[in-house]
Image (cartoon, grey):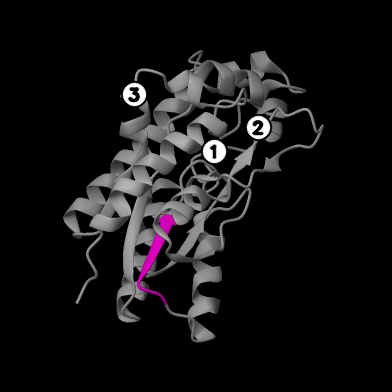
Amino acid sequence: MKIIVIGDSILKGAVTGTASGHLFDIIEDSSLNLAQKALGFEMDNQSVFGNVISKGQRKLNKMLERGETADFCIVEFCGNDSDYDWALVSENPNEAHIQRTPPADFIRIYSEMIETLREHKITPVIMISPALCAERWFKHITNGHNAQNILDFLGGDKEKPFKNQKEYDEALLDFAKKNKVQYVNMREAMLESGKFDDLMCQDGIHPNEKGYKFMADIWIKAIPELRKEA
């Protein structure tokens, strides 16, 4: 079995707040690396830190144009797409700011990617991204910026980014069900674990090493159950 992966830093295995002093580090024991070791499948992981779905679509199209193929393609986007440019928000909280990928465009591009994969006889698999830790994320996005301005933009609700991301994830889950796309719901699994905060880095958006191990266990159960589309 060969799996292509198109996603962002979460499926790349990024962690933040480490002693290295770097903005982020990529750990060897990412969720899919651990699953690969356990299950023995071939993998081409094209996930990129900071990736948004439009860039992922361009990457996928270029790969397919080169003739690359696989049995499955895992697609994972949301966190960066549902986010704002917080520096701009901090400077101009009263202006209208749009998310990096507006919701309608997010689902439209996802739909195009799924259709493209199916045209190339590659079975698509959607990963529903983990949720945000709202308090940690607010602290992270206001670091070095005007926290009050950002809070004003959010209508005084520190959980607004969590709610925004949830709307994207729920719309994506609805899309997957309506279009019979197989999916792995990491958001639900991690929130229902009873230890969500312990699975996340201090920035509130990236899983930590325990989080990636938790995700790996989900993949190890889910991947053997994937069905190749005809």
Q: Is residue 229 above or below residue 33?
A: below
| Residue that label 2 marks | 86
Tell me which amino acid carries mark 1.
Asp
* Residue drawn where x is 79% and y is 37% of the image: 22
State yes or no: discs 1 and 2 in contact (Cβ < 8 Å): yes
Tell me the magenta residue range.
Answer: 70-75
Membership of 48 in magenta stretch: no
Mark-to-mark CA distance, 1 and 3:
25 Å
Q: Quadrant of the N terminus?
A: bottom left
Q: Which mark is residue 83?
A: 1
Dot 3 falls on a residue whose secondary structure is loop
Q: Quadrant of the C terminus?
A: bottom left
Point out residue 106 in the picture as x, y percentages from the top left corner. 42, 53
Q: Residues within 10 Å of mark 1 (few under 14, many from 20)?
A: some
Q: Which mark is residue 193?
A: 3
* Residue drawn where x is 56% and y is 35% of the image: 96
Tell me which amino acid carries mark 3.
Ser
Q: How many labels, in total?
A: 3
Mark 2 / mark 3, whichever is N-terminal: 2
Point out residue 146 in the picture as x, y percentages from the top left corner. 72, 19
Dot 2 falls on a residue whose secondary structure is helix
Mark-to-mark CA distance, 2 and 3:
30 Å
